[in-house]
Amino acid sequence: MDLYEYEGKALFRRFGLPAPQGRLVENARDAAAAADDLGGPVVVKAQVLTGGRGKAGGIAVARSADEATAAAERILSLTIGDHPVERVLVEPAAAIDQELYLSVTVDRGARRPLLMFSAEGGVDIEALAVEHPEKLVRVHADPLDGYSPSAGAELLAGIEDLSLREKLADVVERLYECFVGSDALLCEVNPLVVTEAGDVVALDAKVTIDDSALYRQPELSGLAGSVPTDPIEAFAREQGVTYVRLDGTVGILGNGAGLAMSTVDVVVVEGGEPANFCDLGGGGSAEGVVSALEVITRDERVRSILFNIFGGITRCDQVAHGILTAVETLGLTMPIVVRLDGTNAAEGRRILSEAGNPAIVVATTMLDAARQAVELAR
């Protein structure tokens, strides 16, 4: 679950991180009022769950209420990376002396938390990591022992100003505490700034929380319903369907995450582009198949659907009945390729074949099914 900047900053403040307190508004009138209340120059920032806001014109400095009005009107009319801007954050402008980068994330390869720091923060941090990797310091923390001052010292060894290094060390430790304490997958501050007065302030917040840990985070789990993800993924969540939207034209439905992922791979091997990852789970009821197909067919790019079912606990004849019910209920006409194997597979294939629906193609192997689904999507 990704948090908006204003939500991430609120989380940071809970853990004692220095982050400005702004006002979240939905219209230009309230942006002007917020600028008046805050006094002095303010920054108007689009609240969208994507990067590149600055380059897209989603961040503006306003020196008066009138400028804040104009900035809010312009930003609220933008769409940034397919995300329409519906709210802006108005917060006091900082007198920036230096921009830094700091993050804590999960290094899945090393199976450890990874702290990263650069004395050159701001935009294009990704390019910096590629073109000048020596400027991005990486230090792992022990997942059992946790954060240690020695890790912070190693991370900040390039900071010559001892007073600044001490302030930064405190921020690093608090960010790590936030990362662990909120069950996060990522806590990133870019930029982490040093002001002209010598203060260290988190001017941005990018936070991703582990969805599987939300039951341990009651204060954060309430945000899940308010975060607008992809509309089809949001609908899938409402239907209780495990679904991830991709960019292709072949809809995929398997029973079990491993089989569904393998099906995605096989479609790619056969020259196709998967439209989604969708896991039917251990059952094959008509209701479950209807829900899954209703989710998949909401994506207008889908041109064919590949069912890949292995009957262990799941009975293939039940899945076959579920497919026929779903096709009739939803009035589907797009081609559906079905591969059934395992428990009652022969019976399931017979049921589908005898139904005589021209939209349903029965395949015998996984490769054959993927090949046909790719061809039918062209």
Image (spheres, rainbow, N blue to C red):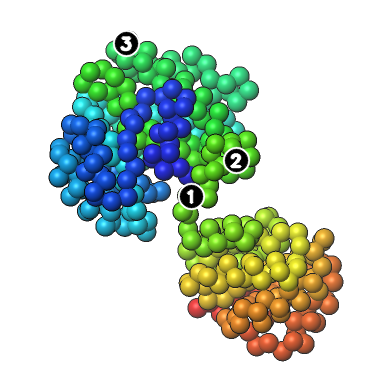
| Amino acid type for the residue under numbered disc 2 | Leu
248 or 324: nearer the viewer? 324
The residue that disc 2 covers is 214
Q: Tag 2's secondary structure?
A: helix
Q: Tag 3's secondary structure?
A: helix
Tell me the quarter of the picture where residue 204 sits: top left
Mark earlier in primary sequence (2, 3): 3
Q: Disc 2 and disc 3: Cα gap in Å?
A: 38 Å
272 or 69: nearer the viewer? 69
Closer to the camera: disc 1 or disc 2?
A: 1
Residues tagged 1 and 3 counted as in contact (Cβ below 8 A): no
Mark 2: few/some/many CA within 10 Å (<14, 14-19, 20+): some
Q: Picture coordinates of residue 249 (x, y %)?
A: 51, 71
Residues tagged 1 and 2 counted as in contact (Cβ below 8 A): no
The answer to whether any part of residue 81 appears in the image is no
The residue that disc 3 covers is 163
Q: Residue at x 58, y 44 (%)?
A: 211
92 or 173: nearer the viewer? 92
The residue that disc 1 covers is 226
67 relative to 193, above or below: below
| Amino acid type for the residue under numbered disc 1 | Ser
Q: Picture coordinates of residue 92 (x, y %)?
A: 25, 32
**Image-based side of 331 in relation to 48, left or right:** right
Q: Residue at x 35, y 46 (%)?
A: 47
Q: Disc 1 and disc 2: Cα gap in Å?
A: 14 Å
Mark 3: few/some/many CA within 10 Å (<14, 14-19, 20+): few
Q: Residue at x 75, y 75 (%)?
A: 320
